[in-house]
Image: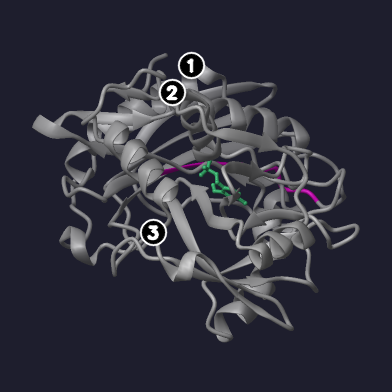
Amino acid sequence: MNIEIQRSTTRRIRVPADQLGFGKYFADHMATMEFEKGAWKNPRIVPYGPISLEPGASVLHYGQAMFEGMKAFRGKGGKLFLFRPVFHAKRMAAGAARLCMPSPPQEEFLSLIRSLVKLDQDWVPAERGSALYLRPTLIGSESFLGVRASDSYLFFIINSPVGAYYAEGFSPVKIWVEEQYIRAAPGGLGAVKAGANYAASLLASQEAKKKGFSQVLWLDAVEKKYIEEVGTMNVFFRIGDTVITPSLDGTILAGATRDCVIALLKEWKVKLEERPISLTEVFAAHKSGELKEVFGSGTAAVVSPVGELTTSTQKYSINSGKVGELTQRLYDEITAIQYGEKPDTHGWIEEI
Ligand SMILES: Cc1ncc(COP(=O)(O)O)c(C=O)c1O
């Protein structure tokens, strides 16, 4: 694929890694291409900046929008690694089909990412815990009114240098069990990284934050009985010596990090069950002392220990609010692979 490159003549604002936070700054360039008349065309890298859309663009009215979230890391000796790029290309393709959008062909998706990260390589922070977060995005760009799929699309990838997710260290978070609002219903978009899912989640997380919680625990939309995800992470429960995570039944996102956690647990011969898990089961395990660890998994935080689950009627402290042993081991192992410090036996990283 021939990628045209238009270099930026100015440098965007940069701050030291410890002030980066998450998603606040963007690197100098972005990659983009368009889908028109049945074909992807014009792959190019241009300076980061505003995009042009007509006010009638379908994404602005009917929400044909989805994205990916992945990272590039700088390891020892300055080597650059992409983490699970093929997984993300495939997930975007699957999600695009559900939203009636054409997805960028895998090779073009990967070539654009590689070229962009190479060009913006001095934006990949070197500090352990930091990374260059990549946001491939796909939107309907045809200008028309009337509910149907767009005929034209815009694909772009923007880059955001991000700092260590845990400003105060790797510490357990407090979670609100959401019993009123739902995130996704069976047959809907829950398994897709569609903008619409995040719009649906905002009110619940805003209210939970006001009450002092970091994220919400989503329950199933039908019975509000089974556990789905925790905020923007998949969730795992260690009950006794078994780790349980909700199965991928169409309402939750198939996380790249979830997949890593499952692979490692299998390798470590930890008993693992992917199945529906109810709140009742979790709270019964808490009562009997069998609930040892709860953690979320996701690209932003890798794994995030949960120290407290609170419902409208009760508060449950987990592992006395301390980081669990397995949670810590998973965090250490995955981050060591991401920074090229441990051999990657799974084919998760790609050096560029
Ligand atoms: C709703 C939701 N669930 C789970 C995840 C975790 O997925 P991944 O591990 O691929 O980042 C994310 C984040 O991407 C998410 O937004």
Quadrant of residue 204 in the image?
bottom right
Residue topped by disc 1: 107
Mark 2, secondary structure of its residue: helix
Task: Evaluate if marks 2 and 1 touch, with contact meaning CB atoms under 8 Å apart.
Answer: yes
55 is higher (above) or lower (below) than 117? below
In the picture of the structure, the residue carrying the numbered disc 3 is 23
Of 328 and 22, nearer the camera is: 328
Residue 153: x %, y % from top left: 63, 37
Which image quadrant: the N terminus?
top left
The residue drawn where x is 48% and y is 16% is: 107
User: Separation of disc 2 and disc 1 at Cα?
Assistant: 5 Å
Count of numbered tags:
3
Q: The C terminus is located in which quarter?
A: top left
**Mark 3 and 2 residues: CB-CB less than 8 Å, in contact?**
no
> Which residue lies under the disc numbered 2?
110
Q: What stretch is highlighted in magenta?
A: 134-144
Q: Looking at this view, is 286 or 303 the one in front?
A: 286
Q: Looking at the image, which residue sits at the far top?
A: 1
Drawn side of residue 155 relative to residue 152, left or right: left
Q: Quick one: label 1, few (<14), some, or many (20+) residues within 10 Å?
A: few
Assess mark 3: CB under 8 A from ligand 1? no
Q: What element carries label 1?
A: helix
